[in-house]
């Protein structure tokens, strides 16, 4: 018998991206940490499928557009935060969970400028052009 994990009321999730793993920190309405997990990149959609739609901040980078598109398909509001904008919110020494917490804090601020999620068609067009030129 598989036990289901109880997912607390998450208001905002911050995701720090790595090569193969993503670090998640979820905050409730008051800003307290209610979720702190390390998830493999391939399992992020299955992990967050049962979470009610919420605001998700993800570290902007080359591979974060794919993850952002997966989370948008689940109904979440996804914003990509450049690491330089999350840095002032980090508390203490740098590690992946603290970076994810800083991203969750930064994405809640209305003045934080976020990177738009690129649609898949942009990637396909670039690959077709590169293939045609090769």
Image: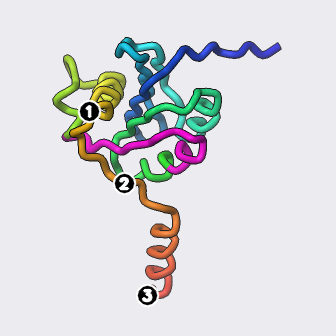
Residue 86 percent coordinates (x, y): 24, 34
- Determine the secondary structure under disc 3: helix
Which numbered disc flags the more N-terminal residue, 1 or 3?
Answer: 1
Please report the bounds of the magenta region as a residue range: 69-84
Mark 2 and mark 1: Cα distance apart in space: 16 Å
Residue 12 image offset from top left, x and y in percent: 42, 27
Nearest to the eye among marks 2 and 1: give it. 1
Instruction: Judge depth for marks 3 and 2 and give the one in front.
Output: 2
Residue 133 pos. (x, y %): 43, 87
Say how many tags the image has. 3
**Residue drawn at x 51%, y 79% as measured from the top left:** 128
Q: Circle 2 is placed at which residue position?
A: 116
Residue under label 1, please give it: 109
Q: CA separation, marks 1 and 3?
A: 43 Å
Which quadrant would the N terminus be assigned to in this image?
top right
Disc 1, disc 3: CB below 8 Å? Answer: no
| Left or right: 110 as drawn, with respect to 78 | left
| Few, some or many residues within 10 Å of mark 2 (<14, 14–19, 20+) | few
Toward the viewer: 18 or 28?
A: 28
Secondary element at image label 1:
loop
Q: What residue appears at the point 43 percent right and 35 percent down from the top-left corner? A: 56
Side (left or right) of 31 relative to 6? left
**Quadrant of the frame with the C terminus:** bottom left
Q: Nearer the viewer, mark 1 or mark 3?
A: 1
Q: Which mark is residue 133?
A: 3
Residue projecting furthest to the left: 88
Q: Residues within 10 Å of mark 1 (few under 14, many from 20)?
A: few
Above or below residue 6? Residue 37 is: below
Q: Which of 54 and 121 is in front in this view?
A: 54
The quadrant in which residue 7 appears is top right
């Amino acid at each position: 018998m598989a036990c289901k994990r109880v997912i607390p009321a998450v208001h905002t999730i911050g995701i720090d991206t790595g090569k193969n793993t993503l670090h998640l920190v979820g905050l409730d309405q008051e800003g307290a940490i209610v979720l702190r997990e390390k998830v493999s990149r391939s399992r992020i959609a299955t992990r967050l499928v049962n979470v009610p739609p919420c605001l998700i901040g993800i570290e902007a980078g080359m591979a974060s557009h794919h993850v952002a598109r997966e989370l948008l398909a689940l109904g979440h509001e996804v914003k990509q935060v450049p690491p330089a904008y999350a840095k002032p919110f980090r508390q203490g020494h740098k590690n992946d969970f603290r970076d994810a917490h800083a991203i969750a804090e930064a994405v809640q601020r209305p003045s934080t400028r976020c990177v738009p999620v690129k649609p898949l068609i942009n990637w396909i067009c670039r690959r077709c052009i590169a293939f045609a030129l090769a």
